[in-house]
Image: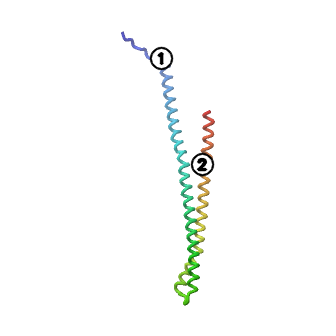
Amino acid sequence: MLTQASPPPQSDLQALLLEVRALRTALDRTTFVGLRVQLVLHRPGQQQFTVNLARDRVRGAEGQLLYLKSQREHLTGRLKEIEQRKPVPERELLTMKAEAEALPRKQQEYEAMVIEAQQNLRMETAKLEDLNRQLDELERRLAEISK
């Protein structure tokens, strides 16, 4: 003969319902924390990428400046050669002198580019270091909590 089980008392049902709600809240909170952790962990990589770009800009600006300096030396040498020729080719000499006069201004522009790129690199590196310090502190706090 089959006997029907009596329904659980109302208080047991309420307790079970409260526990399910608490579990749902904990799951929602865990999911939210997990998403925030992913976001926080993504930031150092993004900042490192920004630092690398800034470092590349510094190298590029320094390379341009070095190229300009070597171009200036080459032009100075060519000017000396031209001035020593007999007869002096006036048109070529005037053209090269005009180029030589423009080089100091260009060099100043390139030096300013290098300085600006270096400042940007320092700023982005400081941001990365600060972010790493914050993450270290967060890790320390989480370690304390988990003890």
Give coordinates of residue 88: x percent, y percent.
Answer: 55, 88
106 displayed left or right of 20: right
Badge 2 amino acid? Leu
Q: Residue furthest bottom?
A: 87
The residue positioned 63% from the left and 43% from the top of the image is 137
Residue nearest the viewer, comparing 99 with 131: 99
Q: Taking 128 as reference, is 8 above or below it? A: above
Q: Which mark is residue 133?
A: none
Q: Of the numbered discs in the image, which one, if any, rests on residue 9?
A: 1
Q: CA distance from mark 2 to mark 1?
A: 54 Å
Give the residue at x 60% y 48%: 131
**Residue indicated by mark 2:** 131
Whole-percent x and y of residue 40?
A: 55, 45
Q: Amino acid at mark 1?
A: Pro
Could you tell me residue 110's position as x and y percent? 58, 68
The local crowd at label 2, few if under 14, some if 14 to 19, many if 20 or more residues have their Cα within 10 Å, is some
Nearest to viewer (mark 2 / mark 1): 2
